[in-house]
């Protein structure tokens, strides 16, 4: 393989030095540890004496037409322009149909979330209609709040369905990170809700409002009942701090925290109304402030965990002392001069990716060094490691 050749064998053809960084990709032999089963695509060529599939020149990479035809398969190209136009027209409809089909045929959590979204949509629609008919602005505002929450839960359901797709040539790492993005979106919405509740409590304190809108009690009780069904559906994830072993765990946890935070909000409104009825002053300010703090503390760990993965921070599960020990063991070898650009990040929870650049002394063998490096990092739980070897 070209990736296993020594840097000096072909660089002379292009007038580049052995340490030139522009051809660093050709010096990255990798012993990848398996993470998920992949189906390799075999490319057959009728003419064995023909040009290679990827013939490298000094200025470009020439891809033969046969390879393009394989790459174009499965894109909906049927015949001429008429086939393309029809596939574009039916694409969105087929996507919606396949989404609902995947939601109904998915695992039990997908089915539960589908029914929870249906209940919330029905309730928010009824609340909006009653609010518009009676002129109650509070009911209309609460209905829009529930509608926006249903949109976020729908995105979570979409992430669950889309993450089941296999990697393709556009998304080579697959679609699993959609679940992390969905969890981060839910956490961001809950933080915004906590901030809005704090502002509402401050406004009620400044205006010295002692009257509570009693017509919202029925709405709060109904909303609490619907959300408690959701908490029961995702009761296995009803915890603040949880160890995420897969991307699904983070998404399920975000859904559970979403409905749990809505339940706390409804319970706070009910408690405030009861306290006002027995003559407690500033009860609304007290209850809204407590709900705001509770939601903030509830969602902050999820916000940090999902944000850290999206920002590609170093995995918190791997101690820095263990990573430093691996670097010292590699540097202690006689054929290694220096280690640089050691980077580690999490693609999704449970899948750590790393890259490492090692400068070796000229004339030393690369294979034994690469096997040694991969063995060290694989023991730490790094499934996907790329080692770049440079001669000095």
Image (spheres, rainbow, N blue to C red):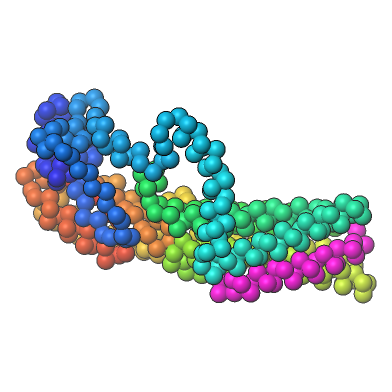
Question: Residue 331 versus residue 278: which sits nearer the camera?
Answer: 278
Q: In the displayed structure, would residue 304 be above or below residue 170?
A: below
Q: Quadrant of the N terminus?
A: top left
- Provide the major secondary structure of the magenta segment: helix
Q: Position of residue 268 (x, y in %)?
A: 78, 68
In this picture, residue 134 sits left or right of residue 184: right
In this picture, residue 302 sits left or right of residue 125: left
Q: Which residues are magenta?
A: 209-237
Q: In the displayed structure, would residue 132 be above or below residue 273?
A: above
In this picture, residue 213 sits left or right of residue 113: right
Q: Position of residue 246 (x, y in %)?
A: 44, 64
In this view, the residue farthest toward the left is 363
> Could you tell me if residue 35 is visible in this image?
yes
Q: Position of residue 97 (x, y in %)?
A: 56, 52
The question of residue 236 being in magenta is answered with: yes
Q: Which residue is pictured at 61% across the width and 63% down the height?
A: 114
Q: Position of residue 256 (x, y in %)?
A: 61, 67
Q: Which residue is pictured at 65% across the width and 69% down the height?
A: 230
Q: Which residue is pictured at 47% across the width and 31% down the height?
A: 82
Give the quadrant of residue 100: bottom right
Question: Residue 339 versus residue 374: which sits nearer the camera?
Answer: 374
């Amino acid at each position: 393989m070209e990736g296993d050749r020594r840097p000096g064998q072909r660089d002379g053809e292009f007038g580049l030095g052995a340490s030139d960084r522009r051809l660093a990709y050709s010096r990255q032999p990798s012993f990848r540890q398996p993470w998920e089963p992949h189906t390799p695509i075999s490319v057959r060529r009728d003419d064995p004496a023909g040009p290679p599939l990827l013939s490298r020149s000094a200025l470009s990479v020439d891809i033969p037409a046969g390879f393009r035809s394989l790459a174009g398969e499965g894109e909906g190209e049927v015949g001429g322009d008429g086939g393309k136009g029809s596939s574009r027209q039916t694409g969105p409809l087929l996507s919606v149909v396949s989404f609902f089909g995947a939601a109904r045929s998915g695992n039990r959590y997908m089915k539960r979330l589908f029914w929870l979204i249906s209940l919330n949509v029905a309730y928010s629609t009824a609340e909006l209609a009653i609010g518009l008919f009676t002129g109650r602005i509070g009911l209309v505002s609460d209905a829009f709040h529930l509608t926006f929450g249903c949109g976020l839960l729908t995105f979570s359901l979409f992430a669950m369905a889309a993450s089941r797709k296999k990697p393709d040539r556009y998304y080579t790492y697959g679609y699993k990170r959609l679940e992390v993005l969905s969890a981060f979106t839910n956490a961001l919405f809950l933080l915004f809700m906590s901030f809005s509740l704090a502002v509402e409590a401050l406004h009620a304190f400044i205006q010295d409002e002692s009257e509570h809108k009693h017509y919202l009690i029925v709405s709060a009780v109904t909303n609490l009942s619907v959300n408690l069904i959701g908490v029961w559906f995702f009761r296995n994830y009803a915890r603040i701090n949880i160890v995420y072993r897969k991307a699904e765990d983070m998404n399920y946890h975000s859904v559970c925290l979403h409905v749990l935070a809505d339940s706390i909000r409804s319970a706070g409104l009910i408690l405030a109304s009861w306290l006002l009825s027995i003559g407690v002053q500033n009860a609304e300010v007290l209850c809204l402030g407590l709900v705001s703090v509770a939601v903030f503390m509830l969602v902050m760990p999820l916000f940090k965990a999902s944000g850290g993965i999206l920002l590609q921070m170093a995995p918190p599960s791997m101690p820095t002392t263990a990573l430093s020990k691996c670097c010292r063991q590699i540097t202690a070898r006689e054929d290694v001069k220096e280690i640089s650009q050691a980077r580690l990040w999490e693609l999704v929870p449970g899948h750590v990716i790393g890259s490492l650049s090692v400068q070796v002394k000229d004339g030393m063998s690369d294979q034994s060094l690469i096997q040694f490096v991969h063995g060290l990092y694989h023991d730490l739980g790094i499934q996907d490691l790329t080692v770049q070897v440079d001669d000095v």
